Each structure stands twice: as structure tokens, then as C-alpha cells.
Image: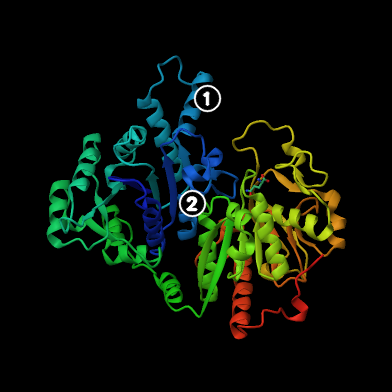
Amino acid sequence: MTKYIFVTGGVVSSLGKGLTSASIGMLLESRGLKVRMQKLDPYINVDPGTMSPYQHGEVYVLDDGSETDLDLGHYERFTNGPLTRDSNYTTGQIYLRVIEKERQGAFLGKTVQVVPHITDEIKSVIKKVGDSGADVVITEIGGTVGDIESLPFLEAIRQFPLMVGRENCLFIHLTLVPYLKAAGELKTKPTQHSVGQLRQIGIQPDILICRSEQPISREERDKIALFCNLKPEAVIEERDKDFSIYEVPLSLVDHGLDEQICNRLDLPSQSPELGPLNEILHRLRNPQHEISIAVVGKYAEHKDAYKSIYEALDHAGIHHRAQIRVGRILSSDVEREGPECLLSGYDGILIPGGFGERGIEGKVEAIRYAREKGIPLFGICLGMQCAVIEFARNVIGLEGAHSTEFDKDTPHPVICLLDEQREITQMGGTMRLGAQPARLVPGTRAHTAYGTEQIEERHRHRYEFNNVYRQQFEAHGMVFSGTSPDGGLVEIVEIPQHPWFVAVQFHPEFKSKPTKAQPLFAAFVEAAVARHNRRSGKAIAEDQPADQQPVRR
Ligand code: GLN
């Protein structure tokens, strides 16, 4: 019998519900259980694909091409169960499905209503994940209890135990217990109110997880338990972790969360295998190198806009025992202040993906700087497209070379629309999306990094390298080290004469894990470590070894 865990949040948003849910998933997997994760988001957009990164952070892409909430990135990094289109639903998607059914006459003339039709649809998408053969489904409800828009989801999970049995369901509620400096104490009232609101809806949480800056005392825990109708041991403290997100699951184990979940749901309770998690923390606490990487992007000031990239850098750091200081640099600042003043101290430069014209010239400038100074450069998606534009302009000498995304009339459209994209007018879900195979050229940096000729990586783009220019690029020293299996689409470009200059059309950051760094991220960080060590070894001389002279026109 599949068990269902529902995670809700109260008091404030941004409590780290995604991370807590992912941690629960990780702990249950570490006990040998088959876990499937799911996120239900209350907003009306059909998916986050059309939303600005300022609104909702990064759009996380799955193998099957679905564009999902960034919490699914936490799930994939922390757990191993497959994630698919069924792992993320929004209010928009639920309504769309119900309205499509209504148009097909599926409701036989009945009045279509929030209860039961919308709530039935929500229950069915939860059940569908359970029916895929999982031991446990963890469904996180986005938003905060008390929001108008999350009500149908809460009503649906209230009804859910009626369908599968209350003994097979567990409600976990995450709240904030704030510390008031003026009073010098923790305040439990917001938590009491939040649980009160849940109980009004008909949900009595089984376990309460309390985020807090300070330790929660025995008395405070007893008080919360009494007011929230729980046993004291069901009130679990989750203290803020300054050092690493990988401390979160371990601290939940210390507070007995996994054990309680297993007891409550009558799950086989073998003890958790925490070796890999401890190893990650050991490596993080004992770095052997310290390097700095600049991420130069349009949304660099927004901490969630390139979430998976920052995480993938961390994983590569764990792999090489390198502590990485990441500098988030706005590409528009590079335009204003020049690359030298903003980028000269870094051991590596990463140019992430993106859309829209703002900051493009700053990215191109940063790439030129990295290429000319021999600084390891990693371009991702739009980052690769900018690397191509830079090479066209400054190495080949194609003046005004550009992507047609930014300059329709460029004399040298080195990046242009994919043929299959030309007729498309709809925005949502219409890009080249999801896992696509690629073939690597033996002996290239990409091939060395992956150690294989066949790879599969996730994509999210409309524009593509323009093959008309391939020979010209090759003649000037750019190598096309990865292409689609038929050779038609350029997937990876690199400059062999440079210490490490690799740019990819796909998004390698989506497949990185703390226990298994993504190969290109690992190779990039290795190159940055090498540069750092070389530079600190001879602090005065800045010269590159002869065989690693950067390419100049
Ligand atoms: N805007 C570019 C395109 O659509 C790059 C997309 C991206 O970086 N994800 O092709």
C-alpha cells in the first residue's frame, strides 16, 4: 500500500518547504524506500515556463521536457525517484484539464464546480503518482496556508485520506517560530494561528516542523504541542543552517523525524544509511582548495535565478574538495564598468542561459576577457550563443555578428532560429525542451570530461548555431566537440588552445547531484583550481604556459 505524505507551510513563504520535503524524501530513500516527489503550485500559470526569473526563480527542466518549479531541482538533487510531467501541477493546469473535459462533455451536463470537480482532479493527479508503484509519495503544497488560491489544494488533501485511508496519510506542516529580539524570546503564536487555520479546513497536522533561528526549549515545544493538538515529540525543530543545506536532513534525523514518519505510517524501519551525506559534509568542511568563480548573468542579483548552476558548482566543489566563492555579476555592470575591474580576480567565468537583450554585450565582453586572458570559461545555452557571437566578431572578424533573437537584420546571423521554431507563435512549452542525445568528438575537452561519446542532456532554447558558418569557425580554431547524433545541430563548442573554454547549448546544471558532480562542471572547476594554484604559485608573473596561450586575432 502506497503511503502519502503532504507537506504544507504556514506563517510566511520562503520557509524552505522544498528543501524540507526533499530532505524527507532523501531520508526515506536512505531507509531503502521507493519515494516519489510531487509539487502542487497554487498559481494560475499553466507552468512556470513563461514566468520571469524575478517572479519565481529558475525554471527547472525535466528529461521529459516539462518546465517546472525550482523545488523540483531540490527533489532531483536529494532523491533518486524519477520526476515527470506528473510531478508538478499548478492551479492553471488543473483548471485547464477540467475545462478541457467539460468542453468534451465529460461531465454529462452537470454543473462543474471547485468541489468536487477541481478537487477530484487534484486527488487524481496525486493518486496517479502513487499508482506508479512508490512506497511513499511526498506531495508539497506550494504557497502558505491562509492564501485564497491554495484552498482547493488543501481541500483536496483533506479529502484524500477518505480515498486511501487515514492510516496511509501523514500531514506535515512547516511553520516559523520567530525570535523577537526586543522580547528576547521565541514566539509561538504565529504557529498556533497557522495550525488553527489548517484545522479549520479540517486538517490536523500529524507532525509540525518549526523553523527557528534559536533552539526551541522544552517548555516552548510543550506549549506549541498543546495549542496545536499534538504530542510534544511531534513538534520538530528545524534550526537555520548557515553552513550547508546538506545539514538539514541530518538535523531532522537528530530530531527523530524519519523515525516518527516510519512509525506513523507503519513503514519498515531499517536505520537510515547516512554515509554519503556525512561524506558530503566532511568534504565541505575540509576543503583543500579555495577558488572564485564569476557567474555573469542578466539576473545575477536574484539568488534563485540560476539556482541549479550554483548548486552544480557546489557539487563540483565537493568533488574536487574546493571551496568556491561565487561572485554574482550583473552583465549590464560589465557593460558599464568593463570586464577588467569586475572580473580580474576570478579563477573561472561562467555565463548562464537567458532570454532578452539586456546585458548581452556585457556577456560578450566577459567572454572576450576570459578568452584573451586564458581564464577558464564555461558558457551555458545563451552563454554558448554569446561565445559564438564573440568569436565571430573578435576572432573571425565578422563585424556586427549577432543572434537574430537580438538583431533581426544582423549581417552575420551566427545564431538563428531553429527551423521548427519559425512558425510558432505560442509562448508556453514551445521551445526545444528536455533530454536530447548528443555525440562527442573523441579527444576533445568535452569528451575527456564525460569519458564517453554518447551523452544526453536537457535543453530549453529556440535559437541555434547557424551551420552556414561552421567551416569559418573551424578554420579559426573553434572546435565543434558535440553535435546532435545526425551532426545537424551544434551542441558544444570549445577552443583547444585555451586553458579551458567550453560552451554548451544545453543545461548541464539540471543533472548534477551532490554525490555525482556533472562532468563539465567538474572539469570547469578543475581548470579553475589549476589556474588558481598556478597563479598563487607565482604571484607576480601572470603569464600563461606557452602551450596555453589564449587565442588572439
Ligand atoms: N534565448 C536563447 C534561446 O532561446 C537561449 C535560451 C537559454 O539560455 N535557455 O535559444
Q: Position of residue 86 (x, y in %)?
A: 50, 42
Taking 325 as reference, is 263 left or right? left
Question: Which residue, as the protein is rendered here, is positioned at the far front?
Answer: 337
Categorize mark 2 by other alpha carbons within 10 Å: few (<14), some (14-19), many (20+). Answer: some
Q: Residue at x 41, y 35 (%)?
A: 122
Question: Which residue, as the protein is rendered here, is positioned at the far top?
Answer: 109
549 or 11: which is nearer to us? 549
Q: Earlier in the sequence, mark 1 or mark 2?
A: 1
Instruction: Name the image colouring.
Output: rainbow
Q: Residue at label 1? A: 100
Q: Residue at label 2? A: 302
Q: Amino acid at mark 1?
A: Glu
Q: Amino acid at mark 2?
A: His
Question: Distance between the Cα atoms at labels 1 and 2?
Answer: 37 Å
Q: Position of residue 495 (x, y in %)?
A: 76, 66
Q: Position of residue 341 (x, y in %)?
A: 59, 64
Q: Position of residue 427 (x, y in %)?
A: 61, 34
Quadrant assignment, res 165: top left
Up/down of 324 relative to 65, above or below: below
532 or 239: which is nearer to us? 532
Quadrant assignment, res 124: top left
